[in-house]
Image (tube, rainbow, N blue to C red):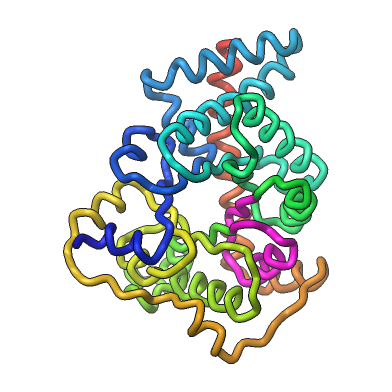
Amino acid sequence: MNLLEQLKTYTKVVADTGDFASIEVYTPVDATTNPSLIYAASQEPKYKPLIDDAIAYARSASADKAVQLSKAMDKLAVNFGLKILEIVPGRVSTEVDARLSFDTEGTVSKAREIIALYEAAGIPRERVLIKIASTWEGIQAAEIIEKEGIRCNLTLLFSMAQAIACAQAGVRLISPFVGRILDWHKKDRGVSEIPGADDPGVQSVTAIFNYYKKFGYNTQVMGASFRNTSEIVELAGSDLLTIAPSLLRELEQTEGTLVKKLDADKAKQLEITQIKLDEKSFRWMMNEDAMATEKLAEGIRNFTKDLVKLEKQIAAML
């Protein structure tokens, strides 16, 4: 049995892509998207009908160009999500504008708009996860909309502080970024490689998983942003893992025995101190964590860059 087949027995496998063909090949339960993935996919001619539909929708919604652009961007993200939901049996994650990362009210409003578009297309909100950056403001927005039955995926998560705040807020799912944590530590240490179990990204997700299971939090852990299959192997047993098609292919082509590394029952036996966070303590913990602070800011900037590129492309068509 190959590693991908074995992984699916321990962990819910999610496709991290906007490419429908890849999703069909690897039969994940869920799929995630982000502005960078949608921008990349939108450059392919085969996805032009999704763009055309978003443009038509925006033009019919308003005569104001700024409003049209906002409407078109939302509809395009949802159009990709709708196509993905034709393939996967579970959920799709659709991301809120990264420029709202420090705007609780704006994030809440945008999340409601996105869910309304899905529901207008006949998709129940249970099949959609709204992706929000794991800032303090984003986490507070998630707490508000989770109470409305809008499920959230808190992304760009790099620290225990972010994870604890998300659990306290009753967030449905978090996406700790394994590979980006590794990137920071390799650069910081001046090394080219850090092996599997010693990988700081793997260690971070393992600690978060154990903390959640120890204290009975319902928030699901979905490791993301993998750089290699050894990171994935070390996190077998996580609630979910979202994996790029290239790594799914590598797992599928690799035979061997996969050991379950994360275990909820074992986590409950660990000696772990529970922490309660308010805004002040959250911000202090984040400030003390240089890696998390830098990677969160960098992630927001990079998602925004691709969002702006896509906006320019769409604006030229309106």
Q: Does residue 182 appear to the left or right of 126 in the view shown?
A: left
Q: Which quadrant holds residue 109? A: top right
Quadrant where the N terminus is found in the figure: bottom left
Q: Whole-percent x and y of residue 317?
A: 56, 11
Q: Please provide the residue range marked out in magenta.
A: 152-173
Image point (32%, 33%), residue name: 21
Q: Nearer the viewer, residue 8 or 284?
A: 8
Q: Whole-percent x and y of residue 292?
A: 60, 65
Relative to 50, say whether 245 is above or below: below
Q: Whole-percent x and y of residue 223?
A: 47, 61
* Residue 167 part of the magenta-drawn span: yes
Image point (53%, 35%), residue name: 306
**How many labels, in total?**
0
Relative to 61, say whether 2 is above or below: below
Image point (46%, 69%), residue name: 201
Quadrant where the C terminus is found in the figure: top right
Image point (49%, 20%), residue name: 50
Q: Whole-percent x and y of residue 307?
A: 58, 33
Q: Nearer the viewer, residue 48 or 281?
A: 48
